[in-house]
Image (spheres, rainbow, N blue to C red):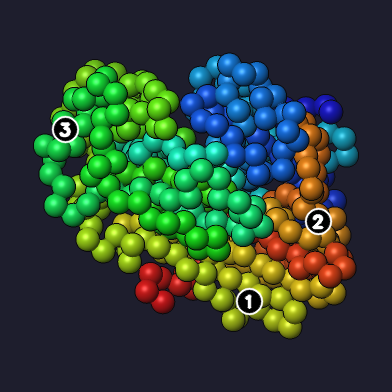
Amino acid sequence: MNTVTGDAVAAKAKAALEAGEGILRLSPTWVPRSFLQPGRRIKLHPDDYYAYGKHRGGIDERWFGSTTEAANDNREDDEGLSYVVHEGERFTLKDAVDALGGEIIGDPIWDKYKKWPVYSKFFDNMGPIPHHMHQNAEQAALVGQEGKPESYYFPPQLNAIGNNFPYTFMGFEPGTTRDQVVACIENWNSGDNGILDLSKAYRLKPGTGWLIPPCILHAPGSLVTYEPQWGSDVFGMYQSLVEGRDVPWELLVKDMPEEKHQDIDFIVDQLDWEGNVDPNFKENHYLEPQVDESASGEGYTDKWIVYGTVKGEQLFSAKELTVEPGATATVKDNGATSIICVQGRGRIGHLPLESPTMIRFGEMTEDEVFISAKRAQDGYEIENLGGDCPLVILRYFGPEVNPNAPTFGD
């Protein structure tokens, strides 16, 4: 397939927008992680989980509507970037947004950020990953990056099996002291540094989720996770061994200034202490789906699955739409949105929409689209054409798009 770059992207992106009436078809974007073991539930063919080579690690993530590059060693030039596909050609969504700006993502987001500042992914591992945090904006800026709040939703369609550890450690137990955490970092090379002894694990439940601000430690468990988040790939791993596997010191300090790589006080002070020892942690971070009655109708139900704010700002939000057999949903959203179909078959606008059974690496699918801001606001139809099977889609939105979304405690 021919890849379009440079000045030619603007005309191609306009043509794709016009042909799709504001709906862009995206191809699958696969991302490997060298330090993790794939959970093998995101429909990639069994032969293709190491398509980048064993030295790169297995593919455990699929990214949606992404203009964010994956921060992997030995990465491909376009790793993490979503591609728009139209008439046998492709170009990155990032290049399309750079070329057309508000025509795709809406003027408010373009004028403020000059980019699509969020993305989402499926995250799928056999077991837990290290207790880690994502830096806030000020910390990430020290190394030329952006901070990363994120959220979780556990789609039931992909979680028929929980794999090895469907629990997530989050934060610290109330009463944990700074000296205890310092000791864990000092004991990095002594084996298990014991940081999970200071934390609490929460059982993960399909069909629910969590909102995790920056600087909060978390060790995601083994459920497939849909993760709307800020457009960054910064992190610091604070756990030295996971299931007996070594976590290199470099993964602790990779997004900290080089002169601070051995400064344990600096490393520990990257954590939001009040947020990590919050005695009401679950109450302040756990998400139950909320039906949006105003966006639901006969034969279809729209639910909020990610909502809430980070330091008073709604940085992203997400919904799950279920369309019953034979029904058609008319959807109107406040802004641009990225869509992935997780169950069933139908159409979105005039484009086919179908959740595949299995995907070969490099194969095109019909389960992912990006809706421009204008088309989202004007409205679009999603029709279930899949016989007796409900059609289910997940979609996420950019910052401050949904002031009507629920808040914690609703």
Amino acid on which the number 2 mark rests in the picture = Leu
Q: Is residue 244 left or right of residue 69?
A: left
Residue 27 image offset from top left, x and y in percent: 74, 40
Amino acid at the residue labelled 1: Ala
Counting from the top left corner in percent of width and height, residue 279 is at 22, 61
How many other residues sit within 10 Å of disc 1, few (<14), some (14-19) or many (≥20)?
some
Per the image, label 3 sits on a secondary structure element best described as: helix
Q: Nearer the viewer, residue 63 or 343?
A: 343
Residue appearing at x 81%, y 56% in the figure = 353
Residue for badge 1: 295
Residue on which disc 2 sits = 353
Dividing the picture into quadrants, the one containing residue 390 is: bottom right
Judged by depth in the image, the label closer to the viewer, 2 or 1, is: 2
Q: Which of the labelled discs sits on residue 361, or is there none?
A: none
Callout in the foreground (3, 2): 3
Estimate the spatial distance between the alpha carbons at disc 3 and disc 2, rounded to whole Å. 51 Å
**Residue 46 percent across, percent down from the top left:** 73, 33
The tag earlier along the polypeptide, 1 or 3, is 3
